Amino acid sequence: MSVKSKGAFLPGNSTVLIKEVEFPTPGHGQVLLKTKSSTICGSDIRAIYREHLGKGPEGYQNKIAGHEPAGQIVACGPGMKRFKTGDRVVVYHISGCGCCNDCRRGYMISCSSESRAAYGWQRDGGMSEYIIADEKDLVLLPDELTYTDGAQIACGFGTVYEGLEKIGISGNDAVLITGLGPVGLAACMLAKAMGA
Ligand SMILES: [Zn+2]
Ligand SMILES: [Zn+2]
């Protein structure tokens, strides 16, 4: 059973194009999500207004835009190991091979396999009513967080949390943030919550 919905594409020339898309039945280890929230990243703005390089990790391959989605699972393909229909989830924005050293350490973003694909760049992303996602890319969204909280965490908060964890921010620190965009604001909120 496939479903149809509209999706947002970035054809260049500072435009966003809305097209009808057909979503297939999810394959092995995949889910069909009903998108509940999908935030816009600084890198999306760059793609809309400035760059369509067509190569590298941000090479846009004419897919549905949006790499910061959160949603609810409405259908599961065969071979699911953890998630089920009805679960509220965040989609991690990079789908790595799952087998290389970087992927196994949790750094899918550093995966150098040819199969690595970022949602919204090399595979369909969140700016649509539905998303096909791999189960291994899902993070369970706790009930106390809204879907929009989840979408914010998918890229901006998650990125900065990793950095703050690595340098071990605590109540002994004062933090200077230069550039208060969404990621800078996330750094501010998280550093404060971690005691700085
Ligand atoms: Zn982002
Ligand atoms: Zn990998």
Image: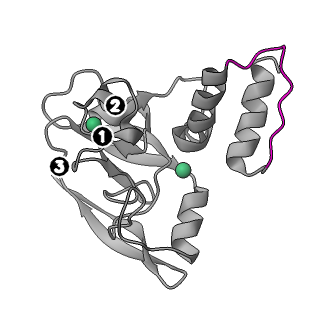
Report x, y in % for residue 27.
15, 43
Depth check: 30 or 102 in front?
Answer: 102
For the stretch drawn in magenta, what is the main secondary structure?
loop
Label 3 residue near ligand 2, CB within 8 Å? no
What colouring style does the render use? one colour
As helix, strand or loop, the secondary structure at mark 1 comes to loop
Pick the residue in front: 174 or 136: 174
Q: x and y percent of residue 114 in the render?
A: 22, 50
Q: Which mark is residue 25?
A: 3
Gap between marks 2 and 3 measured at Cα: 30 Å
Extent of the magenta region: 168-178
Distance between the alpha carbons at the discs numbered 1 and 2 = 9 Å
Circle nearer the viewer, 1 or 2: 2
Q: Amino acid at mark 3?
A: Thr
Residue at image mark 1: 96
The secondary element bearing badge 3 is classed as loop
Q: Are marks 1 and 2 in contact (CB under 8 Å)?
A: yes
Residue at image x 33%, y 58%? 124
Determine whether, in the image, residue 137 is placed left or right of residue 145: left
Residue type at tag 1: Gly
Please name the residue that numbered disc 2 is placed on. 102
Tell me which numbered mark, 2 or 3, is placed earlier along the sequence.
3
- Specify whether tag 1 is near ligand 2 (CB below 8 Å): yes
Tell me which residue sits at (34%, 35%) in the image. Answer: 137
**x and y percent of residue 83 in the render?**
30, 25
Crowding at dot 2, Cα within 10 Å, few <14 / some 14-19 / many 20+, comes out as some
Q: Is residue 9 above or below residue 111?
A: below
**The quadrant where residue 42 appears:** bottom right
Type of amino acid under label 2: Asp
Q: Going 32% across and 67% down the picture, which residue do you hit?
A: 61
